[in-house]
Structure formats: C-alpha cells, structure tokens
Amino acid sequence: MAKIIVIHGSPRKYGAVTKLASIAAKGVEDAGGTSEIIYLYDYRIKECLGCVSDDTKYCRFPCIIIDDDFNTIGEKILESDGFILVTPVYWYSMCGAMKNFIDRLTSMENMIFITGRSLLEGKVAGLIATGNDSGTILTLAHMMIVLNSMGVHIPGWAIAYHHSMDDVTEDDQVILDSYNVGYNVAKLADIVKNSGTWYKPDVDPKSLASLASSEAEKYKAQLEERKKLFEKLLGSGKN
Amino acid sequence: MAKIIVIHGSPRKYGAVTKLASIAAKGVEDAGGTSEIIYLYDYRIKECLGCVSDDTKYCRFPCIIIDDDFNTIGEKILESDGFILVTPVYWYSMCGAMKNFIDRLTSMENMIFITGRSLLEGKVAGLIATGNDSGTILTLAHMMIVLNSMGVHIPGWAIAYHHSMDDVTEDDQVILDSYNVGYNVAKLADIVKNSGTWYKPDVDPKSLASLASSEAEKYKAQLEERKKLFEKLLGSGKN
Amino acid sequence: MAKIIVIHGSPRKYGAVTKLASIAAKGVEDAGGTSEIIYLYDYRIKECLGCVSDDTKYCRFPCIIIDDDFNTIGEKILESDGFILVTPVYWYSMCGAMKNFIDRLTSMENMIFITGRSLLEGKVAGLIATGNDSGTILTLAHMMIVLNSMGVHIPGWAIAYHHSMDDVTEDDQVILDSYNVGYNVAKLADIVKNSGTWYKPDVDPKSLASLASSEAEKYKAQLEERKKLFEKLLGSGKN
Amino acid sequence: MAKIIVIHGSPRKYGAVTKLASIAAKGVEDAGGTSEIIYLYDYRIKECLGCVSDDTKYCRFPCIIIDDDFNTIGEKILESDGFILVTPVYWYSMCGAMKNFIDRLTSMENMIFITGRSLLEGKVAGLIATGNDSGTILTLAHMMIVLNSMGVHIPGWAIAYHHSMDDVTEDDQVILDSYNVGYNVAKLADIVKNSGTWYKPDVDPKSLASLASSEAEKYKAQLEERKKLFEKLLGSGKN
C-alpha cells in the first residue's frame, strides 16, 4: 500500500489547488494507497542559503536551517513512497513558495555526496498546475525534470493542468487527469517498492569511454565524405 | 528481458551522439535488456501534416503518410518495452529531424481517440542531449514532458547531458549518467511489464467535481478573511 | 542617459553573481548610463498572496503587502529606464528569492487593469544566470518571456550565462556577454526613451476577426483537397 | 518605414495561423510598416546538416545546402527590418518545419565567426503560437531566447497565443495581442534603425575579470561568517 504525500502550494485554500489536490488524493486511494495533504502555506519554508556552493558537506538532510518547518515536511516525504506537487501557476512557473520548497529539497538530493544516495531516489511523483492563463506546460516540464534529477520516477500520465478563468470543476479533462495523476503515482509506487537502488555509480568511465570511441570510430569515413562535400559546396556557392 | 530501442538523432555518426548512444546501450544490456540503435538520419521522416486538426480520425497508427519511413520505426517502438532518445542540441532544443519524429509519434498517441489507448502507454523512456553550449535542460525537460503526455514512464535519473566543446569521453559525469539512463530504462521496463493499462478514463467527473467543491468549501471563511484584510490594506496604503 | 538597476539575487555576495553583476554594471556605464546594484538578500521580500485571483483590483502598485521591502525596490525600478536580473541557478531556474520578487512584480504589471498601463511597459531588461551545472537557458528563457509579458523590451544579446564549477573570471564568454548585456540594455533604453506607450488596446477585435476570417477563407479549397487525400490514404493503408 | 516578414509555419492555410498572421500584418501596416507573409510549407527547407560541428567555417550564409529554398527566405529576412514567426503548437513546441527553419538560421547567426557579425543582429522579432491545448508559453519562451541569442531585439508585448479548440476569432485577447505583436515589431524596428552594431567584442576580458574579482573580494568576510554559522548549525542538528 503506497503512502503518498500531496503538497498543496497555494495561499488560497478555497480554490483550484485544493480542488485538484483532493481529486488526486481520491485517485491515490482508489489505487489502494493512502494520502495526506500538506498545505505549504501552513508552514514556514525559508529561502535556501546556497550553502552547497560554499562546501558540499553543508548541504544534507535534515537541512541545517533548523528554525523553520522544512525538515518536518522533509521527514514526511522521507517516510512516503511518493508525492504529488500541486501548484498555482505564477508567471508561467510554480509560485515562489513552491520554488523555495524545491530549492530546499536539495538537502535530500545532495545526500548523494554525503552517504552516496539521494533520499528521494526511487520515490514516485506526479504534478498538477493550475492558473488563469497559459504557462502550465512550462511549469510542469520544469518541475518534472527537477524531480527526475533527484532520482524520482515519473509514471505515464503524471501531469494535469488547467489554464483558464473557468472553474476547474467545469473542466472534465483536468478532473480526469488529476485523478489519474493520483492513481498512477500510487500504482507505480506500489510496483517499484522493494526494487532496490537505482543509480549505479560503480561503473568504470574509462572502459565506457573506450567502447564509445570505438563505436564512433567506425564512422570516421563519414566525416571525410562530409568534409569533401562541404568543401565542394563552399566553392560552388556565392559564399 | 526488456527490449529497448535507442533513437540516434544526429546527422554525424562519428560524434558525441553515437558515443553516448553506445554507452546507454551498454547500460541496457548490463540490466539484462537488449538494445537496438536506430539512426534517424538513415530514414526519411517527413513533416507531420497536422491532419488531426482537420479531423481526429485521420491521425492513427500506421500514420497515413505512407511514402516515408516513419511507420517502420513506429513498428519497432511498438514491439519494444522502451526507448531512449539521443539528440544533439540545436538551438536549445532537439534538432529538427528529431522534432519531426516526435511530431509523427502523434499517430501512436492519438490512438486514444481511435481505440481508447495510446500505443506508447506503459513504455519506458530515457533521454540524452549533447551540445557545444547550454540548452540541454530545456531540451530534455521538453522531451520528457512530451513523452510523459503520451503515457510513457520516466525512471529516476533518466537524463544525461553534455554542454561543452570538450569530447564527451572526457566527461565522466555524462558517461555515468548515459549508462544509468540505459540501465534504469531497462530495469523499470522489466518491472512494469504486465502491469496492465494506466490511464483510467472510466471515472465520473461529476462526482469528482462535487468532492472537490466540498473540499474547497471547507475553507470559504479564509476568502472572507482575506478580502477583509485586503480591503483594509488597500485603504491604508498610498495605493 | 539611461538609469539601470541591477538586481543581484544570490545569498552569496562573494561569488559569481556579484562578479557578473559588476561586469554588467560596467557595460551600462560604458554605454553612458548609470547603474545601481540592489542586493535582493538585503531586503525582505515576502511571498505573493495571490490576491489578484480574489479580485483583480487588489493587485496594484504599491503592493498591498506593506510590511516588507518590495515596494522600495519597485519604486527604484519605476524610476529607472531598465533593469538587469542576475540570478544564481537553483534547480534549472532562478532561486526562490528571485521568483518571489518576480511574483511580486505582478503588482506593477497588473496596473493594466487599474490604470490601463503596466508600470513596466517600455522599460528595457537583460538577464544573467550562473550555476555549477546546466539549466541556464531554461532559467533565462523563462525570465525573458515573463518580463516581455509585462511590457519590457529585450535588446539583442540580452543574456549571459555560466554553467560550470570553474570560476566565472576564467570564462571569457560570460564576461563579454555580461558586459554586453549591460551595454545593450543601456543603449536600447536610451534609444526607446520618449517613444510613448506601446500596447494599443483600442483596436476593434471584431473587424480584425473579420479580416482574419476572410484571409483564411481564401484557402478553404485546400481543406477539401486535404480531406480527399486523407480519406484516400486512410483507405489505402492498413490502418 | 519598417519592412517586416511574417513567417507562417502551418501546413494548414485555412486555419488559425493564417488568421493570426494576417492580424499581425495589419498591426505592422498600422504602425507604418510593410509586411510580407511567407508560407513556410510552400518552400522546401531541409534539415540542418550540423556542418558547424565539423568546422565552423562551413556554416555561413548563403547556407551551403543549395538544393532547397532556405537561402531564398534568408535573403528576404536579410533585406527586412524584422520578422514575426507564427507557428502552430505541436507537442508544446514549434512544429518540425519551423524548427528546421530555425536550425538553418544558424547560417546567418554563425557569420559572427566568418565576418564578425550575425546577419540577424539588430533586427526586431515577434512571436505567435496557436494550438488546441497548452504549451504555448514553452513554445514562445524557447523561440524568443533563440532569436535573442542571434542578436534580435524583442519589443515589449511581442507574443500572442491561443490554447484552445475554440476558433481564434472568438478570442479577443489573442486578436489584440497578435495585432500588437505586429504593431510593436514595426514600431521598434523603425526606432532602432540606424543604431549601428550591438555586440561589442572588443573588450578586454582580463580587465573585466579583475574588476569583478575586486568587487567580490569586498565581501569575503561574509563567506567566513557563513562558514562559521554553518559549522555551528551542523553540530547542533541531528545531521
């Protein structure tokens, strides 16, 4: 049974983010999982201090910023099998509060350099964005690649979005999609449970580089042919 | 045993794309999978005609453009468990040849409206981008969300990139990452095999909308409080 | 003589953001302008409350959040001819502090709905992003379109970026580019001064719609031809 | 009087791209400019061969690919003061045909390395994207930063977009915005005419690096303070 955290990123609890978060939570439950909604604005999440750029050893979990609530939410994510971020779209992107939260997740990812493993590796995530105007895909594409770079799996159909002034409850597509974000995150989280670690660092780059070079070497004649062609074209044109 | 197709998107077979593609293929094999590299430039892939905008029924697989090679590659992807796209970065994005290929994949995704299912649903993908300059993350974020929107799973650490004039074989990070793209795509493809369909369309949007509205309704007092506060602030400022 | 504000978005004043900001400032001065560097982390910029979604009239400049420093910086921008944002790259995007600042600029842009004009219309901006890893172009592309959507002009060569662990002072390209960001922002700001308002809202959409429809109408035969072709292809394929 | 080329990127001449292109052209004319619409699908634009990666000298204008129509369009752009790209949105991005066109523009930009100047430097551009679904902002942000990186100015309010199945003629916002894209591109093109070259390469990076280092040096005490704080926090936490 997958445990999924739903992170609600809007200052407005009576609006679209709450609606879509609750639909995603229903999807989680229908897939046999349990869900908990965290309202980000109920917590104080300070800005990241960028300590990792001073010395990578400073950036670890729990985050060394201990006078706010990030670590509390971090612990919940740590104990979960996956999570769903639901954000309002502010200027074609997640809101600043959600961005600060993402920035602070670095403390969990950077454990790669402390213990060898990102604390988010192997978790499963989904993403929902809602706004009055366009920009949802830029928002979601950015969030998706960030999470993936922290070691998080993204199931098919892991996104839902709404980009209009109409109420989200009148938009069947975002309703079905949000439900499926919940359903698929919980389903994949169940499936990948107990599948061990993912990133394999113990590979010899030298031997892979050598294999790569031999493969490219096979085509070196193509370079000569191309150069011959380009020289001929250069001469023939008015260039 | 996962069958993974590696799509090579560069006109230059003696370069970085070949090198990283071969490293990803090695990762696939080390995870117990089999790989096949397809050189996109060996095939003729015409531009999408946008027939779906005339009538959604025209867009289906095999694509109705039958005088080029797209359907041949499409068949290979259909028979695979997953695929890895390796693209050179041209202007902060995949090259035009790869974009045409992606545009034509619509014929596989749009089967949603013909048979009810995207032909790519449940497959697993990874992505590699290499260029002399920046723009790799914009390239990869775009490609990732496109594939995910076609129903494709993205395993953690599914990306690798190189953004410099140096040879990729001197960049240990992109070597390890490309290997892991292959390894993780094959590993997840094995794990999710036989897990059935993913998108559940048979959900009642009305009942979900009603659940969503009740949830938001619980917080309606917050709206009144906020408005009261904003009115007060409006009066107090120099606005 | 153009007055250009340089917004410094890093918590680390001894690092790359300071270096590139000072180079951009030099470019401004060499173009005959004056520059002032604002260190964002010296100010308290709270998260946007999203009041515009409650009622568009709440969102105006000065922002109704009056217990922080946003309006002070807003005033400086208001009095300027242009500005340059210099941000560290946190997860392929501007840092949360800069995002909060951008979110709060909504109060200046949303004056469209209060007085008919964005307070940023006609200003000129440039953008610099620096980080240890990739993601600079995604960062800059996002920032650029946001500012443009607020009515800001972007001169050619308005971006500079650095994406490596090396010191920025060893990267001649980012040095030259940062200088040119400053130079070109100041130069264009001088050129566009006194060129009046830009967005023309007093246009009749109905007559433009009619012109547009007539233009498209000229090609209606193409639709018929295409449909005929697609029907034939549908029949001929194995679809 | 500004000469503006409107590049129409859709295979469907009876649709939204034609409508918005004609509205933008009207805006150009109302600003006192002249416009010419180029239908990209009437021309054959082959894929870029990536010759610049073999040797930068191969990539120049006219492009060495001389058996297609790119150079014809390139000449038109060369003679213009600005241009407007109007693209359908295919998978959250410009269509493959437009991407091939952008890739081929490298031949004009890369003149930097042949003659010292991008042939697009100082031109002015605007962008319009239209599709049935979301993805317009990702499309436009990408296109905007590409053009800017070629030396092109982007006037405020240079974008227009439509993201729905409804006809564009029913969307007053995209109509007004498309008109303003045309108007503002022509207006800025007039203003910046005869303003000379923009990118200044003749700057000494060493002296700028030295200035930058001195500026950062002023804040070196902050680094020590931060490290002291982080060490203390590291000890105090459960890390």
Image (tube, coloured by chain):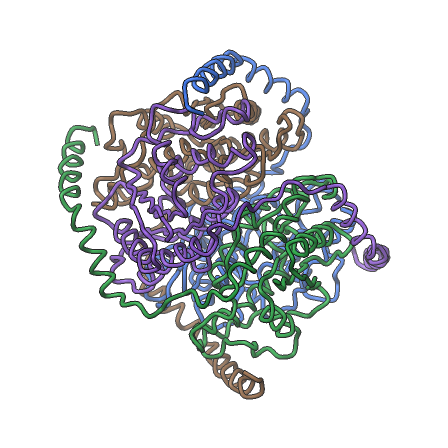
Chain colours: A green, B purple, C blue, D brown
Task: Answer above or below: position of A15 versus C220.
Answer: below
Residue D3 position within the rendered picture, expressed as x and y whole percent measured from the top left: 45, 26
Residue B100 position within the rendered picture, expressed as x and y whole percent measured from the top left: 39, 35
Task: Answer above or below: position of C121 versus A146.
Answer: above
State left or right for residue C119 relative to residue D72.
right
Residue C57 position within the rendered picture, expressed as x and y whole percent measured from the top left: 78, 47
State left or right for residue A162 relative to residue D117.
right
Task: Answer above or below: position of D157 versus D169.
Answer: below
Q: Nearer the viewer, residue C206 or A1?
A: A1
Q: Image quadrant of residue B12? A: top left
State left or right for residue A152 relative to residue A16.
left
For this orientation, the residue located farthest to the front is B194
Answer yes or no: is residue D6 visible: no
Q: Nearer the viewer, residue A10 or C166?
A: A10
Q: Residue at x 60, y 65 (%)?
A: A101
Q: Residue at x 59, y 77 (%)?
A: A65
Answer yes or no: is residue D106 visible: yes
Q: How many labels were placed on the picture?
A: 0
Q: Nearer the viewer, residue D158 or B129?
A: B129
State left or right for residue B111 relative to residue A86.
left
Q: Residue at x 57, y 24 (%)?
A: D23
Residue B93 position within the rendered picture, expressed as x and y whole percent measured from the top left: 40, 45
Q: Residue at x 63, y 62 (%)?
A: A4
Q: Image quadrant of residue B43? A: top left
Q: Nearer the viewer, residue C75 or C94?
A: C94
Image quarter (top left, top right, bottom left or bottom right) of the C terminus of chain C: top left
